[in-house]
Image: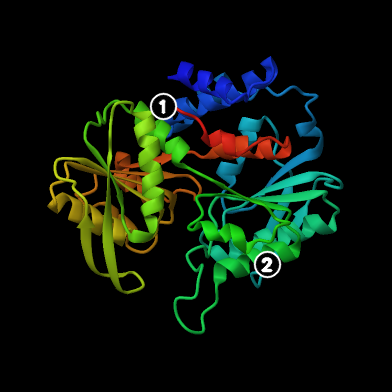
Amino acid sequence: MFTKLFSTFRHYNIFRNHGKQLMLVGLLSTICYRQKLSLQVNPNIKQYGDNLNRAFKRALEPEDDFYKHTIILSGNSNKELAEEIAEYLNIKLGSVTIGRFADGECQIQVLDNIRGKDVFIIQSTSPPVNDNLMELLLLVSALRRASARKIIVVVPYYGYARQDRKCAPRVPISAADVARLLETVGVDRLISVDLHCGQIQGFFGPRVPVDNLEANLVAQNYLSLQKKYEFKDVAIVSPDAGGVYRAKKFQEQFDQHHPGMQSHLAMIIKQREGPGKIASMNLVGQVKGKDCIIVDDIIDTAGTLSEAARVLKEQGAKRVFAFATHALFSGKAFTHLAAPSLDQIIVTNTIPSKPQEEVLGDKICRLSVAPLLAEAIYRVQKKESVSTLFDIKQ
């Protein structure tokens, strides 16, 4: 498999010299091996991760100017992911103190000298959404006042993304308002993973480019390496009409990673009584006797997911898997995820895991997007193409 990956990269002229080849090959090898060996929820996750981190490290030379002008900081929302990204890049996280006053106000102080530096802030605006968003805004403000040259925010999960349009009178377009707040405090660029809708990129002005990374890359590597699944007849399912494009793209990549297999596309038409309340679900497509993979970007209360899985099983689906990038797991999520109609739930670590996940054991598989984000950060800083990262063919 790796031979094919490397030949594809040569085709796209990504490797211009031997040193760069070692850097990119090492990181992409890490993506595949970590998904295969270490990223399932099991007692050995730490051991495997440490072994692989020692075996595969980005081959950056100490004199590389990436180190001279770059600082990576982390907020409180997902420090584990930030530490993992820094480890892949072989760079230490910058020092920052984030505390709270007695009344709950956020208190921030950056301890490193960042004058003239390019600073990457890693902070998901996940629950508690408002606290994490305020941390991010004040961090950016502190860096701008301290004369940072550029401020790039890495927001693996972009909060308020589901409020991207006016669907009722007298309501805000919150996703756009968050974008305006970030622009106002002085953000120069934003990197995110699987935005809920593509138009959020347009909420930022042309002076603030947005890189919307696709977690499909790590999911496809994981699925192709798990020989225990033995996929034969597969249907990729969108849980609602709005996610058809996402499911279609996943289907195309799935077929590329499984030569000779022609997967099918299905969709569930969902009608709601109100927020979080489903009135009815109707299936469009054939799933009888097939392994179904439900593809979505967010699992919140998991009500839609469990109901979709139930409908698929009623229509004759053999097994039902689910892949979603952002695992919010709110409300009765774990009760819904425990439903027997769901065989496997695959998520990423854009949002930290919750202790309740241990109850479900191996039913939840959590993949890491740290290699993906680390490579994107490096390419942005070195002024290399980010889009070619997703041109990999199996």
Looking at the image, residue 58 lies above or below residue 267: above
Q: Is residue 335 visible?
A: no
Q: Position of residue 385 (x, y in %)?
A: 65, 36
Asked if residue 160 lies left or right of residue 62, the reply is left
At label 2, counting other C-alpha atoms closer than 10 Å, the crowd grade (few under 14, some 14-19, many 20 or more) is: some
- Which circle marks residue 181 in the picture? 2
Residue ID at (67%, 69%): 105
Which residue ends up furthest to the bottom in the rendered image?
170
Quadrant occupied by the N terminus = top left
Quarter where residue 133 is shown: bottom right
At label 1, counting other C-alpha atoms closer than 10 Å, the crowd grade (few under 14, some 14-19, many 20 or more) is: some
Q: Position of residue 325 (x, y in %)?
A: 44, 48
Quadrant occupied by the C terminus = top left
- What is the distance, in whole Å, between disc 2 and disc 1 at their CAs? 40 Å
Q: Nearer the viewer, mark 2 or mark 1?
A: 2
Q: Which residue is mark 1?
A: 37
Residue ID at (39%, 61%): 330
Q: Position of residue 192 (x, y in %)?
A: 57, 50
Going by the numbered disc 1, the residue's amino acid type is: Leu
